[in-house]
Amino acid sequence: MTRKKVKLAYIANDSARKATFKKRKKGLMKKMSELSTLCDIKACAIIYSPYDSQPEVWPSPAGVQHVLSKFRDLSEMQQTKKMMNQESFLRQRITKANEQLKKQCKENREKEMTQVMYQNLSGEFGLQNLMNMADLNDLGYMIDMNLKDINKRVESLAKVGSHDNSQGSPAADQPEANSTGSQQFINLQENIGFGMGGDEMMNPFASDGHNNGVYWSNGPFFP
Amino acid sequence: MTRKKVKLAYIANDSARKATFKKRKKGLMKKMSELSTLCDIKACAIIYSPYDSQPEVWPSPAGVQHVLSKFRDLSEMQQTKKMMNQESFLRQRITKANEQLKKQCKENREKEMTQVMYQNLSGEFGLQNLMNMADLNDLGYMIDMNLKDINKRVESLAKVGSHDNSQGSPAADQPEANSTGSQQFINLQENIGFGMGGDEMMNPFASDGHNNGVYWSNGPFFP
DNA sequence: TCGTCTATTTATAACGA
DNA sequence: TTCGTTATAAATAGACG
C-alpha cells in the first residue's frame, strides 16, 4: 500500500481534518513537554480548537498565565525600546535641523556683511552702524577675501599678458600666499586692531567649533 | 551503530542540550505551522530560550498578542464564572443561616410560651401580658400538646394497670385522635375564640410555610 | 464516531568535518 | 561552534473494526 505524502494544505474532509487535528495536537503537546523536560525551559502553547470551547493549553492555565505575564512585560519592554528608537530618531532629526540652521546663519551673516561692504563702497561710509568688534572683524575678513580674489585675477591677467598666453584660468590659485592681497588683509586687520597673533588665517563664518565666540556677532539671524 | 533511545530527562551536557533545544524548537515551530495550515486553527506558542533574550514565538509577536487577548478574555470569563460559583456558594450559606434563624426563632417562641404557661400554672394569671391573638393561639397550642402528652401517659399507665403489662412505651402514639386531650384542646381553642374551622390540627411553630402569619407573633426573638 | 493498526514520513541523537 | 550525514526513534496518514 502506498501512503502518499500528505500535501501541506487545508484538509477539506471534515472527519479527516478532525482526526489529524487531534493526533497532531497530542503530538505537539508531547513535544512541548519533552522540550521543557530535556532543556528545562519555560514555554507555553495555546491551541484554539473548533471542537471545544476551551482552548487547549500547555503546560496549564496557571503556567500559561505565568508565561504570559512574562511575555507581556517583555512586550512592554520592546515597546519602550521602540519608543527609545523613535526618540533617538527624533534626536537625529533635531541635530540635522540644527546643522542646517547653523549653515543658514552663516549664509545670512555673509550676505549681511556683503551688503554693508557694498553700501560702504557706494560712498556712504556708515561704519557707525557696525556696532561691535565682531562685526568689524567679519567685515574685514570679507574684504580680505574679495581683495585676495581680485589680486589673483590681476596676477593671472598680468601673467597672461607677459607670456602672450591667452588661455590661463582667471582664478588659478597661486602657491605662494605672500601676495599683496594677503598683506592688505593683515594690514586691515591691524588697522582695526584685531590681529590673530600669527600668520594663520581663520574663516570667521566657519561653524566647525574653531570660532570661540569672537567672530560671531549676535545679528538678526543668529539663534 | 546503535543509537540508544534518549532518556527523557534534563540533558546535563551544555552543548548537547543547546543543540537539542535548537533542533526541537525548530521542529516544534514547524509542527505548529503545519497544524495551523492543515486544520486552519488559531494557535500560538512562546518558548523562552536561555540562549536568547527574546522568546521564540509563533506565529509572530502580533499573532501571539492576538491569541493572547482572546485567551485573556476567556480567562476573565472563567474568573467571572468562578465568581458566580462563589456567589451561589454564598447564597447557599445565606439560605442555611436563614433556616437556622427560623429554627432558633421557633425554639425561642416555644420557650417563651412555656414560660408564660408555667407562670400561669404557678398561680399568677397574668394573661393581660399576652398582647394579641397570635400569642394566645400559640399558648393554646402549647397547652394542648402538653395535655395530649399527659393523657397519653395516663392511658398508657391505665393500660399497664389493667393488663398487668409493665412494658408499655410511655409516649406511644394512639391511632385514634378523639381522646380527651384533643377534646380539651378544641374546647380551649373555642374558649379563646380561635378554632381552625376543621379537624386538622396545625403546629404553629412549624416553619414549613403552612403558617400564614396567624400563628406567628412578632416576639422579641422574631426577625 | 472512536480507537487501533501499520506503512511511511518526519524528527532527531550521535557523529564527523 | 555550526553545518551536514545517517541510523534510529517517533509521529502520523489512511485503513479497518
Image (cartoon, coloured by chain):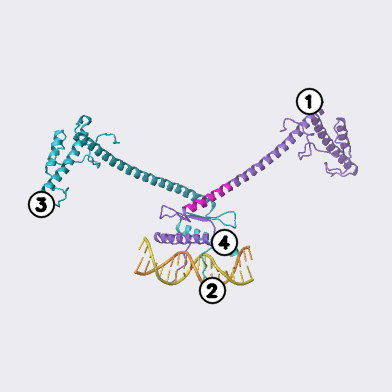
Chain colours: A cyan, B purple, C orange, D yellow
Nearest the eye: A32 or B100: A32
Q: CA distance from mark 1 to mark 4?
A: 79 Å
Q: Is residue B211 found left or right of B159 in the rendered image?
A: left
Dot 2 corresponds to which residue? Answer: A2
Mark 4 secondary-structure assignment: helix
At 69% across and 38% down in the image, what residue appears? B98
Residue extending farthest left: A162
Check if mark 2 and mark 3 are on a common chain.
yes
Nearest the eye: A137 or B143: A137
Asked if the residue at tag 4 contacts the one at tag 2, i.e. Cβ–Cβ closer than 8 Å, the answer is no
Can I make out residue A63 in this image? no
Q: Indicate the amino acid at tag 3.
A: Asp
Check if mark 2 and mark 1 are on a common chain.
no
Given this view, does label 1 or label 4 mark the residue nearer the observer? 4
Q: Indicate the amino acid at tag 1.
A: Asn
- Pick the quarter of the image with the C terminus of chain A: top left
Label 2 vs 4, first from the N-terminus: 2
Q: Is residue A11 found left or right of B61 in the rendered image?
A: right
Mark 2 secondary-structure assignment: loop
Dot 3 corresponds to which residue? Answer: A164
At 50% across and 58% down in the image, what residue appears? A32
* Mark linked to residue A22: 4
Q: Is residue A10 above or below residue B211?
A: below
Q: CA distance from mark 2 to mark 4?
A: 23 Å
Q: Is residue B218 above or below residue A105?
A: above
Q: Residue B157: percent from the left, percent from the top?
A: 86, 40
Write down the quadrant of residue A217 in the picture. top left
Q: CA distance from mark 2 to mark 1?
A: 102 Å
Categorize mark 4 by other alpha carbons within 10 Å: few (<14), some (14-19), many (20+).
some
Task: Give the residues drawn in magenta, as a range.
Answer: B62-77
